[in-house]
Amino acid sequence: MITAERKPLDELIEYVKPFKRILLLGCNECVTVCAAGGRKEVGLLASGLQMALLKSGSNIEIQQHTLERQCDPEYVEELVPMIDGTEAILSMACGCGVQQLAMRFKNLPVFPALNTKFMGASERQGVWAERCQGCGDCVLGITGGICPIARCAKQLMNGPCGGSTTGKCEISEDVDCVWQLIWDRLKSLGQEDRYVDIMPAKDWRSGGGSGPRKIIREDLAE
Amino acid sequence: MKTESRLEKILAAGHLAVTSECGPPRGALPDEVRKKSNYLKGIVDAINVTDNQTAMVRMSSLAASAIIKQENLNPVLQVVSRDRNRLAIQADIIGAYGLGIDTMLCLSGDHTKFGDHPMAMNVHDIDSIQMIQMVRDMRDKEIFQGGAVLKGAPKMFIGAAANPFADPFELRVLRLEKKINAGVDFIQTQCIFNVEKFERWMEGVRARGLHKKCYILAGVTPCKSLGAARYMANRVPGMDVPKEIIERMSSVPKEKQADEGVDICIETIERLKKVEGVAGFHIMAIEWEEKVEEICERAGLLPRPQV
């Protein structure tokens, strides 16, 4: 999923304080799962903003709503009947959702309530960790299902570097050395011989090196 | 011979090679480069020039190497994949060769987290092994990494690092083998304080015949003080400084610690000379270049052979 964290309240207040009426908009997808921008967080942020603004003597009307998906135009379209009188939108979606709104509502300021972080997975309750950088040419099939691009601090395709110590990365004892994990996994799969093959220099065009990426499915595109 | 590198000539002739290093200054101080490198004149066969080591900005390794070349010394251009993409690295390699620099070392580099620009992006477009492949192809196939033909191939003698003390130990020989398969000509190891562990690594190296496929220079460092030894033991990633070394450094009064550090370094070189497959020494006297002469003299590494 795409993970995110809410921005500090002070930054959000700066965004919304010029307005009398805003729409605070959650998203029911990834940011709901990582507890950053779902229905529940919309409610919490709305009261947080109300209280903070009341304290400073300003009054703002916050309309709360959560879309099934902010990154999808057909769901964004649902906002049209309720947007009348709204002076700005504070989006609790990832950056994709925020931009979808900005493109659709040309005359409305749209602000991000979240910092979009990374594509990750849940390690345990309340903990998410980066797993994929969307390089566009997946190598997991030859690295034992563990990604050196997303999870090596130096993105080494032929690691581990000389800083790997007792399974940990040189940058922090809290970070696993991904090449230790890959090696352990190759061993348990009986694929140690794969390690000696040199992984060639990556073609980053698929990973964004040649500009913004797009997928066009001819069979589906209208 | 693949190149005109003096280091290659020394090694190919079967002499124990000696290299040392110069860290470029943190400012436009060319005389400092001249001063440091001249401590090593006639003492070592080639001088490594570090590339923004510990992720701190310094005079570029290319510029400092060129200054050292002007002093009629032989620089080893260190290049890290952390700071430049493949276009910039290849441009620097051609430029370096154009300035008469014929020996280089391919590294990934310390993470920016450790330096004075922790906010900087780590580039790592390619890794150190892919860099070795790239330089070899530029030299031997006369092509750029992107496949285009280049005119005027840079005939670089290609080096890389190996750390026998990092984990997992069982991968350390295999990773050396990957570097050899990528095309490395010589290796300089991480500083050796734990000689037993180095010997175990070399057993693995010899078992796969790797010492016959590249030249292995054993890295040594004289500890300047007990504090320096402790710092290396606790703070430098991938360093293995056994507690016996720390104890030995702390057993002498402060004013004698530098001498003790030099003694340990010389004893280490003597032990390493007996290890089959060691082709020379890389003496990393960090900010202590003036000591290298004494170390080489007392370790019987002088005079340097003429080739």
Image: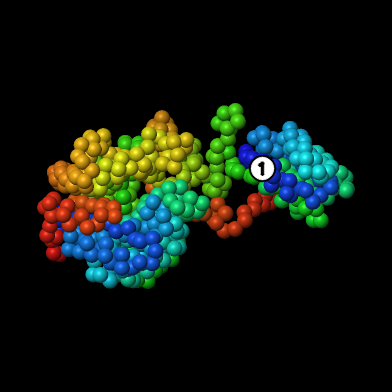
Q: Quadrant of residue B10?
A: bottom left
Q: Chain of mark 1?
A: A
Quarter of the figure that contains the N terminus of chain B: bottom left
Q: Residue at x 77, y 37 (%)?
A: A51
Q: Mark 1 — residue?
A: A8
Dot 1: what SS? Answer: loop
Pick the residue in front: B138 or A14: A14
Give the percent coordinates (x, y) of residue B121.
Answer: 50, 53
Give the percent coordinates (x, y) of residue B136.
Answer: 34, 59
Q: Residue at x 22, y 58 (%)?
A: B290
The answer to whether residue B206 is visible is no
Left or right relative to A21: residue B241 = left
Pick the residue in front: B29 or B145: B29
Pick the residue in front: B232 or A89: B232
Q: Quadrant of residue B44?
A: bottom left
Left or right relative to A139: residue B50 = left
Left or right relative to A26: residue A8 = left
Give the percent coordinates (x, y) of residue A70.
Answer: 74, 43
Q: Quadrant of residue B268?
A: top left
Q: Residue at x 59, y 41 (%)?
A: A119
Q: Amino acid at mark 1?
A: Pro
Quarter of the figure that contains the C terminus of chain B: bottom left
User: From what the image shows, is residue B32 above or below residue A180?
Assistant: below
Q: Residue at x 34, y 61 (%)?
A: B24
